[in-house]
Image (cartoon, rainbow, N blue to C red):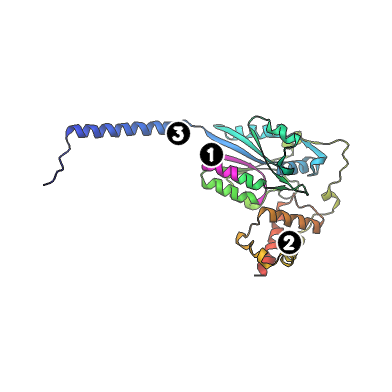
Amino acid sequence: MSNIQPTGPTDLAALAAGIERTNELLTRVLAEVATTPSTHAAFVDAGYVYAAAGRLVSGTEDRRAFDLDAEGIIEAFIDKARMIFPDSRLLRVYWYDGARRRIHTQEQQRIAELPDVKVRLGNLNANNQQKGVDSLIRTDLESLARHRAISDAVLIGGDEDLVSAVEAAQGYGARVHLWGIEAAGGRNQAEPLLWEVDSQRTFDLEFCKPYVTRRAGVEYTDPAAAEGPVPTRDEVRFVGARVAAQWLAEHGREWVAELLPGHPYLPGTVDQELLTAAEAMLRHSLRGHADLRRVLRDGFWEHVQGQY
């Protein structure tokens, strides 16, 4: 005989009361979510800002030749974000720069003391090239997105290595907005980065001019200005293949073969070594020419793949 008894009026009332309590709880949760403000953060590659703003305003990327009002341009970025995200609150601005042995310079100390700004340092090698900055950006951007600490990320930079950081943040539901500084000729942001982000914005000369001041009494000759015309795409592609041939001879096929799974991207350190080697051969800086840097990588990969 079955022990199941028909539901009585008391049981139905208890069930209805339970459903009502659940509905009230869901209503409160949804109301809290609806009123919780969205949050944004800015991730600034200082090396990119110095190089791009310096070249645009004073004609050189060499930090010795100009002063950048970092506090002023950071505040300008914050104000612009307030306008674009009027219903969002700022978490903080992350300022990524390089320093010898990761020891803050006086300028970096002043920036670190600014409200709502956190300075994160990578290494600076003997050629004054930043090392480890891209990985810091990826770590912070991915972590904040994963923990739902931000809904929107403003990324100010141009390196192709940042593509993985963008993809990681988007995978957790954050929207990534790429901001850049106008390049006098060509682009100073990698095309794959432009393709991946949710929106783009470029700041022109009038925006940057108040924050860059050429240093008086500094005699500096811009290498790019003394080098003559910008190399052609064919010349850059040939140099990319030439560097690949040299590396194959120096490091062996096994070392180069380890790069193949990452095609069409190169690890950050390898990409910087390729750029440095190519600039030495071309006797011309490619720092302000993202399109030519991509052609350089294409030439490199074409030669490597042709050997396998």
Which sits earlier in the primary sequence, circle 1 or circle 2? 1
- For the residues labelled 1 and 3, the Cα–Cα distance comes to 13 Å
Q: Secondary structure at mark 3?
A: helix
Q: What amino acid is found at the position of numbered circle 1 in the picture?
A: Ser
Q: Is residue 87 magenta?
A: no
Q: Compare marks 2 and 3 and give the one earlier in the sequence.
A: 3
Residues at circles 2 and 3 in contact by the CB criterion of under 8 Å:
no
Q: Is residue 231 left or right of residue 161?
A: right
- The amino acid on which the numbered mark 3 sits, given as a three-letter code, is Val
Q: Which residue is mark 1?
A: 151
As shown in the figure, which amino acid type bears the numbered disc 2? Gly
14 over 157 or under it: above or below: above
Q: Residue at x 24, y 32 (%)?
A: 14
Residue closest to the eye, 73 or 276: 276
Which residue is disc 2 drawn over?
A: 240
Image quarter (top left, top right, bottom left or bottom right) of the C terminus: bottom right
- Disc 2, SS: helix
Q: Is residue 59 above or below residue 264?
A: above
Please name whichever residue, 49 or 141, is drawn nearer the observer in this view of the structure: 141
Q: Which residues are magenta?
A: 139-160
Image location (x, y in percent) of residue 191: 65, 52
Q: Which residue is mark 3?
A: 33
Marks 1,2: beta carbons within 8 A: no
Q: Secondary structure at mark 1?
A: loop
Residue 159 inside the magenta-drawn segment? yes
Q: Residue at x 34, y 31 (%)?
A: 24
